[in-house]
Amino acid sequence: MRRSLAPVLALSLLLPAALGAVSPPTPTGPALWEAWPTARVSPADPWGLKHSGLRVALADLQARHPGLITLVEEGTSAEGRQIPLLRLGSGPTGVLLWSQMHGDEPTATSALLDLMHWLGTRPQDPAVQRVLSRLTLWVIPMLNPDGAERTQRWNAQGLDINRDALRLSSPEGRFLKAVRDRVQPTVGYNLHNQNPHLRAGATGTQVALSLLSVPGDEAFSVTPGIRQTRRLAVAVDRLVQPLAQGRVARYDTDYTARAFGDSMTRWGTPTLLIETGGWAGPAEAERLVRLNFVALAGSLSALADGSLAAVDDAAYDRIPFNQRDATAALVVRHVRLASGRGLAPFAADLSFLLPGPFAGERPRLRQPVLTEVGDLAHVLGLADLDGTGLLAVPWPAPEGTDWPALKTLLASRKLDATDEATLLAAVQTKGEAAVAGPGFTGAVLLYRTVGDRVLLAGAVLRGRVVGLELR
């Protein structure tokens, strides 16, 4: 009897050791979100980080974490600024991460600084050990320092580096291509900012992160590498959904042979595109850097520990697409809109955009602007005003006019409290300058009808509501 128990006893003694040998799970999104404040070394304003500041930050990281970050080489921008290529880890799987090839797209640059600090401050963390022992990270945190200096998309030559993968006319593009060809990374991360006024599907909210398994040909062939980047996209989606529910979308694009992401995949480095959108409200920039940190640290951990292989790549197709022209900084709904053309007031919604640090391929806004008039039920207003019962009156207002001054001016003309016919006649005298169409930059006065009078209640001034409460 004792002999028969011996193997069972031996097995019971081995089980704890076997169980203890199981790798700890991949860090969750919420856990990484909570870890970020202690990992953070990035500046409060990502757009304020220029080439000189980046060099100081990298030198500081190297001093804090000796042996972690190797400056492998430096490319040179069109204006002679150095472009550092960094290496972290020594594993067999190479990962190339490049950010800010568009100079006005800096969010992921800040997140990469935080990622490197996180790796350096947690040498005993099993997830960190796996990343550094199983992956080799090749990091170009700021590919376009000349564009970053000007907060512009293009490099100093006026070239969009991300459309230079075939001709390689830019020194920055040549450097990125040379790095890829030399290190032959298994996977790439192409890190950008996108138009912040996009919606995650028809029913989602403002997109914070947009993901794309970048195609390698016009047929969108699903190769093993494409499946890998599809799984990475799904992993990122699952990491950040608990933190940003309804704010993740799929980037909708055609295959573009001259673009670097598409070319990387075609050249043999399947690439995941991560585009940072918007998250309107206080500390927006901070939240987006934090979300990027979660996406990068979590997906790299899943790649390192092998758990990525269990992710169903078919779930990629269930990530909703970006919806364009479906978000605005402000929507005023259900007003009766007057016009300087003397037309009868009609039912309309109005949408407005505000200038921001990122313009993308669009001309940069210099001042707030009215973007659309009509039925905007499909548009998500990051600020929203129900204008039911209000008469909206376009009114040319010189730049710099504030609400008290505008009220004083209208009162001096007895237009703060009058009858509708008198008000509409006054608007008609302004002619085309008081037509609320796309591109209008004046004020939109908002009147309430009380009996046979219309009373000034508020306005949209420089793209913001004054005098009335937003919902």
Image (cartoon, rainbow, N blue to C red):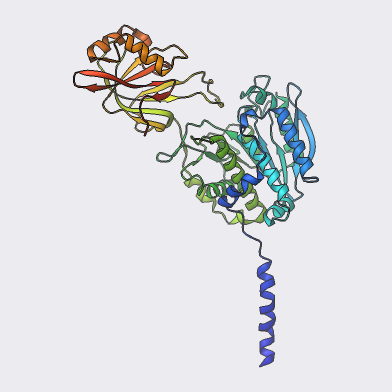
| Residue 94 place in picture, x, y as percent | 72, 46
Image quadrant for the N terminus?
bottom right
| Residue 397 is at least partly visible in this image | yes
- The total number of labels drawn is 0
User: In the displayed structure, would residue 290 be above or below residue 154?
Assistant: below
Farthest residue, direction left: 451
User: In the displayed structure, would residue 340 be above or below residue 73?
Assistant: above
Left or right: residue 319 versus residue 431 is: right
Image quadrant for the C terminus?
top left
Left or right: residue 372 versus residue 87 is: left
Left or right: residue 424 versus residue 203 is: left
| Residue 31 place in picture, x, y as percent | 58, 52
| Residue 178 is at least partly visible in this image | no
| Residue 284 place in picture, x, y as percent | 53, 35
Q: Nearer the viewer, residue 217 or 10?
A: 10
Q: Nearer the viewer, residue 201 or 65?
A: 65
Q: Quadrant of residue 40?
A: top right
| Residue 214 place in picture, x, y as percent | 58, 39
Farthest residue, direction top: 429
- Please report the residue visible at 80 percent of the width from the left and 46 percent of the height from the top: 67
- Please report the residue visible at 51 percent of the width from the left and 23 percent of the height from the top: 355
